[in-house]
Image (tube, coloured by chain):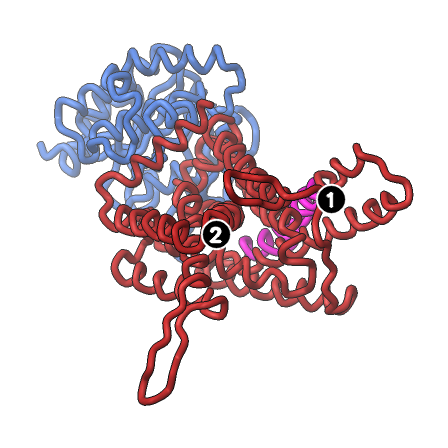
Chain colours: A red, B blue
Amino acid sequence: MKEQSSLGSTLVKKLTGNLAATIVVGTTLVLAVVIGVEGGPSQVINSIVTGGMWALLAVGLALVFGVMNVPHFAHGESFMVGAYVAYFVFNPIHTSLKENPNTFLGVTAPFLAMLAAAVAGLILGVILERLLFYPLRLKTKSGWVMNAFLLTVGISFILTNGTTLTLGPNFRGIPRYWDVPPLQVGSVRVAVDRIIAFFIAIISIVALWFFLRQTRTGRAIRAVSQDELGAQMMGINLNFIYPLTFALATAMAALSGASLLFMFQAYPTVGLKPLYFAWYVVMLAGLGNVVGAIVGGFIVAVLQSATQLFTFTVTVLGHEFQIGGIAWEDVIPTFVMIIVLLVVPSGIFGSEVKGVQEQ
Amino acid sequence: MLQLKNLDASYGFLQILWDVSLHIADGEFVGLIGPNGAGKTTTLRTIAGLLKPMKGEVLFKGHKMNTVPAHETTRMGISYISEDLNLFVDMSVRENLLMGAYIVRDQQKQLETLDFVYELFPRLKEREGQLAGTMSGGERKMLAIARGMMSNPLLLLVDEPSLGLAPHLVTDVFKSLRRLQETGVTLMLVEQRVNATLEITDRAYVMEQGRIVMEGPSSELMTNEHVKAAYLGI
């Protein structure tokens, strides 16, 4: 595929002559191999699946920041909305299928649920942009980034608490989307849900890449992210590009929420963790950098797996501390992120963050 | 083609333009000269819709343009080539040019215009695949001008094309503007190189401290005592 190869060549371009990126990516690859040897191939496949999802989420963040200069802290709530929509679409179908089995519907119902989530994300994105960011843009003379940041935090609070109020704090989940036995990949068995979730992430990212590179509207989005004034001078209507970008990002987050429903379930604060990981990714890769976000997604996922897999015990002043394990999942990526920010402040793929200085 | 009537414009509380009136006829090549900070760029920005006037009127082909946003003015046929160029630095030369033709939906037409600007600036064709951000100052300038032409504008506003260019490139750029006028485009040129500007334009306005202080055919302005003393250093 043409767009696939151009994605690859852009990656190679970003890596050559970039010491920080080479070190981080190289270390990650080594780590992935070690994980494979120590924890078995299933651990590696796990990292790849989660990596795909973090990438999908992070691409949305990178897009929103790059184009609109919005540090989006309500991205997790888009994930949450997607999870709920998928649950409420899938669950009734699933229940009725128990009484009158229908293979076709059994196979397609999950996709239907994900599609519904993505569409809900698109709509939510347009509404949020028009209702909140648009008026804010008209009012803001300076300090846009800070104002937009606070607005997204507000959106996050309202959506989380609004959901608790209306739907309650209960977990709503499904054990799996497809009632089929796990697939045999080499020597490992992988749940079909995971494989499909991974492919959904990859297909969405490639589709987005293709859209941004090859279509007129996609190029306009990139133009706005590179020079807003120049884009206006070319006849690009920002009041079309902003809602579109925000809707796309929201839809991608909702889609990941939907396709990971079997892993995360749906509850009001489900978006918190995906949000954090997506932010680790974009900070690592550089804000507003879409290609970097893809690589970053896999790096963070590998770090996460490694943290879960390896544990050390350290004795300090007679107390024993355990380092590693699932509770440390946030610690190690954050630690790596701090190191990266200290050494290469604009992220390892070093896209200079023009927007912030301009505003 | 274009008429400004008693235009006042400001950035916040700082008023820059005071009662500016000027007009450009179809097919004309008009210069706007004056010292730094006279309000020349502000005039162009107001025409391009990037700045809303406080008072007065901007009329383009009979339409009142005061509240028309920048992207609409481009669609109506005004192309503005800014001093900062506003190139898309992470896009190739070709992609930048095609962005310039964003409002042209006919692909055939886009490619025709592309051929035309490549003929005008052969250097750009050589650099077709290069990222705009990695080009030299002169090449960027050419790219910005070429990109401004890609929308097939009726009126082209060019802001300080000679700034930071090597002298032989300035001649090239001015020649290409002249050629553009021959194809029927109306042009407005803002420049500090008064001599060269008066040589290629039909008519010119002199702007000082936000006001139009003088106007007339370029050949007459060249012999005008005030212009000679203040700008030509003769």
Q: Amino acid at mark 2?
A: Gln
Q: Is residue A135 magenta?
A: yes
Residue A321 in the image, given as x and y percentages of width and height:
39, 80
Query: The residue tagged with tag 2: helix, strand or loop?
Result: helix
Decide: is A34 above or below B199: below
Disc with the residue nearer the chain's start (2 vs 1): 2
Stretch in magenta: A113-138
In this picture, residue A238 sits left or right of residue A343: right
3D distance between C-alphas at marks 2 and 1: 23 Å
Which residue corresponds to the image point at 48% horizontal and 26% vertical from the top-left?
A214
Q: Main secondary structure of the magenta part?
A: helix
Disc number at residue A219?
none
Residue A150 in the image, given as x and y percentages of width and height:
53, 65
| Residue B43 seen in this snapshot | yes
Q: Is residue A95 magenta?
A: no
Residue A36 in the image, given as x and y percentages of width and height:
41, 49
Circle 2 marks a residue in which chain? Answer: A
Residue B23 in the image, given as x and y percentages of width and height:
42, 28
Q: Which residue is mark 2?
A: A43
Query: In which quarter of the view is residue A74 placed?
Result: bottom right
Asked whether B109 or B201 is in front, the reply is B109
Asked whether A100 or B132 is in front, the reply is A100
Circle 1 marks a residue in which chain? Answer: A
Query: In which quarter of the view is residue A242 placed?
Result: top right
In this picture, residue A32 sits left or right of residue A151: left
Q: Which residue is mark 1?
A: A179
Decide: is A327 above or below A148: below
Query: The residue tagged with tag 1: helix, strand or loop?
Result: loop
Asked whether B203 or B109 is in front, the reply is B109
